Amino acid sequence: MIPRYSRPDMTAVWSPETRFRIWFEIEAHAADALAEIGVIPKSAAKTIWDKGGKAEFNVARIDEIERETKHDVIAFLTHLAEFIGEDARFVHQGMTSSDVLDTCFNVQLVRAADILIADVDKVLAALKTRAFEYKMTPAIGRSHGIHAEPVTFGLKLAGYYAEFSRAKRRLEEARREVATCAISGAVGTFANVDPRVEEHVAKAMGLEPEPVSTQVIPRDRHAAFFSALAVVASSVEHLSIEIRHMQRTEVLEAEEYFSPGQKGSSAMPHKRNPVLTENLTGLARMVRAYAIPALENVALWHERDISHSSVERMIGPDATVTLDFALNRLAGVVEKLVVYPERMQKNLDLLGGLVHSQRVLLALTQKGASREDAYVLVQRNAMPVWRGEGDFLTLLKADKDVTKLLPPAEIEALFDLGYHFKHVDTIFSRVFGRA
C-alpha cells in the first residue's frame, strides 16, 4: 500500500492489529463451540475471551517470535498464550493454520467490499445529480472520435450511472462469493474438529461455511472477487478517459475543477491539466493487474500449498486500497466537474449541420429514392462541408436532385435539434426509474 493512494478506513482493514484481532476472534469463537460440544471446559472458553479479548497484541513481539518459529500463526498463538496462561492449551484445538488465515482473509475481503460498495454509491450519487442537471444540454456524440449525431450531456452521464450500477451489483456478488469460512482441520476432513465448530464460527463472523475446504478455501472464489474489482476499475478508467478527452483544448466541453492556487505545470503557468483523471487511468491499470495472479492462484497442489499466500498478502491490500482511493477520487471529480454548455453547442455546430445527414438520408428514402441513391445525394453535399466549403443546409437546398424529392421547407425541418432528444425521458426512466 502506498500512503499517497490510501484512505484510512480501508487501510485499517489490512493493518496487523486488525488481522491479529480477527485471528483471535476466530480462535475464541471456535473455543466457544468446542466448549458447547464438550471438547474443552467452558471455563477455558471464558478465560480465552476474558483475557484475550482485553489483550493489546504487540505486533513487534509477534514478529520477534516469528523470526524464530518461521511461522506466523504459531507466533501469534505463542503471544496469545502469554495473556491467557494455562488455558491456552485449549486454543486452536483440531484446527490448522489455514482455518485461521483463510477465514480471516475472507473477513477482510468482506469488510473491504462493504467499503467499496459505499464508494460506488458516492459515484452514483454524483453522476445522478449531474445527469439531471444536464439532462437536456445538447452535445455532439462521437463514434471513432469523429462527430456523429447529437446527444445530451445528461445522456452521457446517465450511461455511466448505468455502468456503475452494474459495478455495484458486481461488488455485491464479489462480496457474497468470498463470504465463506473454513474450520475443517488438516486436509479439510473435520477429523479433529467437529463441523459444528465451523458452523458456529461462520455465523459469529458473518460468513457461510465453505461446502468443501481442502484445508484451504477454494481460490476460484478469490479469482472472481479480484476479477470483479478489475472490471470496476475499468469502469473508473472509462469515465476518466471521457473526461480527459472532453478537457482537451480543442474540445474543452468539460474539465476538472482547478482550485485557487493550483499549478498545472512547473514550466508553463497557463496549463490546466486533467491530472486527477490521468491518475485514475493509471490506478485502474494496477487494479486490473492484480486479477491475473488471483486467477493463477486457483490451481493449488492437491489439498493445499502456499503459493497463493505471498500473492494474497500483496493483492488483498493493494487492490482494495487502490480501488477505494480511485472511486472516491472519481466521485469528487464528477461532483466538481466544470461543464461548458456553450462550448458543447459550438462543437455541435462545428461541421455546419452534417450531424443531421442521417435524417436527410431517411427522408429521401421515404420520398421514393433508393437507399443507395439517397446516400450518394447526401454524401456529395456533405463532403464539401467537411472540407469547409459551405454549410450543409444551403448545399442541400441548392441541389436540384434533392429538392425534386424534398422541398426546401421540408429540408429545413430536418435540421431540428430537438428531434434527437425526444426519447431522453424514456432513457432516463430506464436508468433512474420513473419519478
Image (cartoon, grey):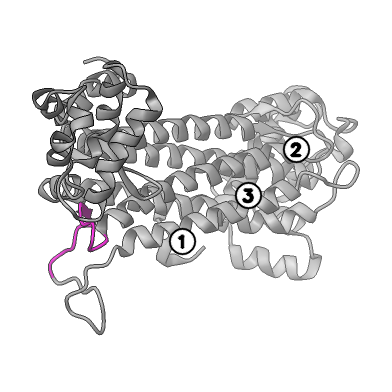
- How would you classify the magenta stretch by its main secondary structure? loop
In this orientation, does residue 17 appear? no
Q: Amino acid at mark 3?
A: Ala
Residue 308 visible, this angle: yes
Mark 3 Cα within 10 Å, few/some/many (few <14, many 20+)?
many
How far apart are the two marked residues, 3 and 1, measured between alpha carbons? 15 Å
Which residue lies under the disc numbered 3?
A: 291
Residue receiving disc 2: 217
Vertical order, 137 against 283 (above or below):
above
Question: Which segment did they paint magenta?
Answer: 248-260
Name the side, left or right, on which 7 lies relative to 184: left
Q: Position of residue 308 (x, y in %)?
A: 75, 52
Comparing 339 with 303, the one in front is 339
Q: Secondary structure at mark 1?
A: helix
Q: Is residue 174 within the magenta segment?
A: no
Residue 416 versus residue 278 in the image, above or below:
above
The residue closer to the viewer here, 257 or 327, is 257
For the image, the number of numbered tags is 3
First along the sequence among labels 1 and 2: 2
Which residue type carries mark 1? Gly
